[in-house]
Amino acid sequence: MEYLILIIYSSSLLFIFLFSLGQLHLTLQYLKSKKKSRELSLVEDGIQEDKLPAVTVQLPIYNEKYVVERLIDTIACFEYPLDKMEIQILDDSTDETVDLIAKKVQYYQEKGIDIQHIRRPDRVGFKAGALEYGLDIAKGEFIAIFDADFLPRPDFLKLTVPYFLEDENIGVVQTRWGHVNKDYSILTKLQAFGLDAHFTIEQVGRSAAGSFINFNGTGGVWRKKCIYDAGNWQPDTLTEDLDLSYRAQMKGWRFKYLEKVESPAELPVYMPAIKSQQFRWNKGAAESAKKHLGTVLKSGISFPSKVHAFFHLLNSSVFLFLLIAALFSIPMLFVKYAHPELNWLINIGGILLVGFFSISFFYWVATKEFVPQNTFGYYIKVFPMFLMISMGLSLHNSIAVLEGFLGFKSPFVRTPKFNIQQVSDSWKGNIYIKQNFSWLNILEGLLVLYFLAGIGIGFYFNDFGLIIFHIMLAIGFGNVFFYSMKTTG
């Protein structure tokens, strides 16, 4: 039994270590790429309006009464020739959002804007189904997609579309997400911290390394021909964006990522909304890994690209291995106490600190990019809490990953939007919030006690090697439990 515990614990740490080395390589690729970026050259050169292609802007909507009017107003202000821009509102709503959209559509149609309110007979395929439905009747050669919480800049299309004209092999142009409510609360700060690292280090790093990147579901533009060539939108995963991204790149299409073009959006402001988003992302990533990993590894792409694709597709699995390592870390204290002769083997695990420093460097570089004036102060304040909350979400996200790999199907659960930008704004009374006390909340509360016990056991055995790890886990699960129970804002 002791050796089984040791093998499971060490294997989990090994995966986390290897993943962290991959993140380190992406960080180095990112730093290297910053020296030779020419991202905005096409914008600086400009392009004649008569050469701009027809574009369809798709807005998939499902019950978004708080933000849908803001979204439509934003898109209607795009600086693009009216005769070359079509707006499709792909509306699957079942509440008063339908009427709000209808009024806005009529208003802008009277102003000469080609905007259509498209209602499907049923919600088959959820978001992927809506996008496919709209694509079949879209007029544009290129398809821009925005979720309901986005507020793209007026010149978005002029900043993105020219890249397709430069290279006919480009299938997607993706922009970086911004955050309109980053400073609303500690939860929004932490989400922004993690997303910023993805949209700088990971996306730029993978692109610079010549590896696969992904369309992020919104804030980007597709070449219609690329979507069809890759097999169109498919609803068999909860991350239809990642799924189509891999199918397209396996077909030879190139993706262009624009780090300097920001598409602002609203971050979820309460824990159950964050959890629903995280569940969809992590389960969908596992489903996409199950669907594509074998094909990618057997393909003719380079070995480094296969390695990056391996960890990219298994990104969400880090939560599962983190949870396993956390749960087995307390039995490990008993193994060490009962078998001091194994300490030399257990202590080899100290080299896995390299993994921690790799991750720390990964987020440090991202922080330096976004907070250049006070990098150290901001990093010290946010990074530890980000790590702890990530640990606290490991149970919730691990369940999502397991469901994805085991083939358990679940509906596309939307993340509630709030139209919250200022600290004074409140989400109290939001009709889309359903506060439920679940068995998962109970387990998260019990894990707080479990890791507090681990701290006590460490003191009892006079073994402090895992004390910081257990403190962070207790704080992480404690915060996730607290914010999951919080019902006002």
Image: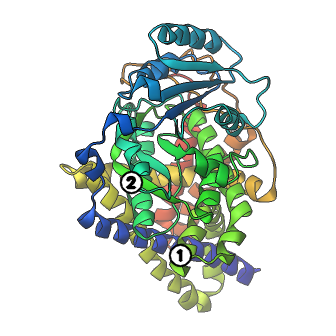
Report whether residue 214 is seen: yes
**In the depicted view, which residue is nearer to us: 367 or 69?**
69
Local packing at callout 2 (Cα closer than 10 Å; few below 14, some 14-19, many 20+) is: few
Tell me which corner region of the image, top left, top right, bottom left or bottom right, holds residue 233.
top right
Considering only order in the chain, which callout, 1 or 2, is on the residue closer to the N terminus?
1
Q: Determine whether, in the image, residue 363 is placed left or right of residue 148.
A: left
Residue 166: which disc?
Answer: 2
In the rendered image, residue 61, in percent from the top left (x then y), is placed at: 61, 26
> Can you say whether 257 is above or below 360 in the image?
above
The residue that appears at 48% across and 35% down in the rendered structure is 54
In the rendered image, residue 438, in percent from the top left (x then y), is placed at: 73, 36
Residue at the disc numbered 1: 18
Residue 392: which disc?
Answer: none
Q: Determine whether, in the image, residue 468 is placed left or right of residue 298.
A: left
Q: Looking at the picture, which amino acid does disc 2 mark?
A: Glu
> Can you say whether 303 is above or below 168 in the image?
below
**In the depicted view, which residue is nearer to us: 147 or 109?**
109
Q: Secondary structure at mark 1?
A: helix
Q: Determine whether, in the image, residue 121 is placed left or right of residue 96.
A: right
Distance, label 2 to label 1, CA atoms, is 37 Å
Local packing at callout 1 (Cα closer than 10 Å; few below 14, some 14-19, many 20+) is: some
Q: Looking at the picture, which amino acid does disc 1 mark?
A: Leu
The residue that appears at 47% across and 35% down in the rendered structure is 267
The residue that appears at 59% across and 21% down in the rendered structure is 64
Report whether residue 449 is seen: no
Tell me which corner region of the image, top left, top right, bottom left or bottom right, holds residue 155.
top left
**In the depicted view, which residue is nearer to us: 438 or 64?**
64
The residue that appears at 46% across and 69% down in the rendered structure is 210
> Can you say whether 235 is above or below 87 in the image?
below
